[in-house]
Image: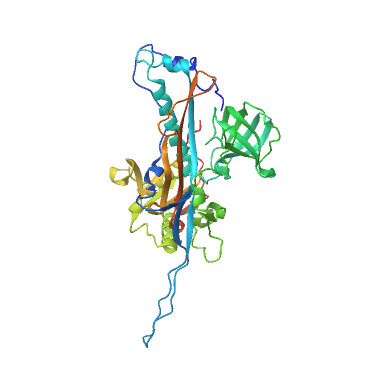
Amino acid sequence: MAYDPTFINDAEIAGLLMNVYEGVREKLVPISTPVLANIQKARAGGPRNFQWGGNGVRFNARVGRPVGMVASSSGYFPNHATALETQGLLDIKRMYVTREVDGLAVLGTQSKKAAYQSLVKKVIEEAKDAIELGMAEIVQGNGTGIKGLITAVGSTTSITVSSPYGVAGAGEGGLHLDVGMQIAVLDTSGADAVLGRATITVAANSGDSVVLTLGTAIPGMASTDKVVACTDSDTSYNAYPNGLINITNRGNAYTSLHGIDAATAGYSRWNSVRLTSADVIDVEVVSESDIFDLIHKIKGRSGKDAKSKPGEFLLVGTVGLEKKLVEQFYPSRNLTPQDFIEIKGGYKAVSIFGLPFISDPMVPAGTIYLIHLPSLVWVDSKDWGEVRFQSAPAWRFIPGQDAFQYTFGAYLNLGTTNRAAHGSIVGYTDANRYSLVI
């Protein structure tokens, strides 16, 4: 990739140059990934002892009900019986974050007498924040990497986008789109061919739509075309790790996971419990009865009981639905410390039926998940870290330019060893938006 001086250059670093030295830098973008912090990590030799093979890990999944018990007044043994098993494959996805800096900017900010803080430290810290936000998007996604779908085309440089994750009604169109992002538009009616690439120069949010102004014209765009992240040579489409949308088979649109298809005869247990607006008492109110139904349907399907082992489960939903739950369960008194549960990562969660409820602005609107944490795993062959070979420096000189490039990378994926242990409720009225979009 050629160096782009609009990323960071000495003129833009002027804001860092010292007037009165202060060791404080305030982050204005909230970073919080409590769901990821509570997912059990697994790798070769790790807690799940997965067997690595090729580019991923393989595991055995029992997709049938254990059978075979008989009674015999004459003492005869039954015939052999076994539950149907198959093998799942959890492959690995490659993720990257890159930052570039101008050589003069580096020189001008090396000393505390010249800058609020080291430019290198600033760039690395910002890259790590981008990783955290990106991982939060991944956990709530569906593996497609779709940022949104085009709903209207104003011109070759102006489009209206909605449906984050490519899911209708999932929230604000600008949830995963903002100024400075390089995106590609894929032709939905033409086998998802790349129509063009551009950098977003303006993102004007209004309700659940965002109007994007593109720095480069892309001809041929139309409604339903996909917007995805991209590089100069590739796109992120279908290259993302799995997320809760496809792990829980939202809308029965993701029957196949880890190479096991729930639509295959005998494999129907390889599926999650899915409740919709037709299954709840009132779409305007998140009731205790709805959560009760979800708990016991998961128990019946998987044998995992959230009421007897609440510490193994996590309720996850939008902030708006968390508010509705709190209003439902605690209408006549203020919340006390006893109404909160501390979970992994130092996060505090509201207690519902003894289950911790965590809200996340990346959750699709109107959605509540009940996930079984021991069955939800994060595998990696390379955790997030610098991309470099052996002792080579992490900062790479950009040929022909007085500039440097730095990249973080990871080879990872999210998955589940027991899809039946997770469930969801979708379709609540969730008008409030508490997210990164402004």
Picture mark count: 0
Residue drawn at (57%, 31%) of the image: 182
Closer to us: 142 or 161? 142
Q: Residue at x 49, y 49 (%)?
A: 91
The residue most toward the bottom is 74
Is residue 71 shown left or right of residue 279? left
Q: Position of residue 135 (x, y in %)?
A: 45, 39
Q: Is residue 303 visible?
A: yes
Return the x and y of residue 229 as percentages of the image width and height. 56, 36
Q: Out of 432 and 178, give the one closest to the viewer.
A: 178
Residue closest to the far top: 19
Q: Nearer the viewer, residue 221 or 210?
A: 221
Q: x%, y% of residue 262?
A: 53, 60
Q: Is residue 191 left or right of residue 234?
A: right
Q: How is the image coloured?
A: rainbow
Where residue 105 sits, quadrant-wise, is: top left
Which residue occupies the extreme front position in the image?
391
What is the x, y in percent for residue 192? 65, 43
Task: Say if residue 432 shows up in the picture.
Answer: no
Is 418 situated above or below 393? below
On the image, which quarter does residue 393 sit in?
Answer: top left
Q: Quadrant of the N terminus?
A: top right
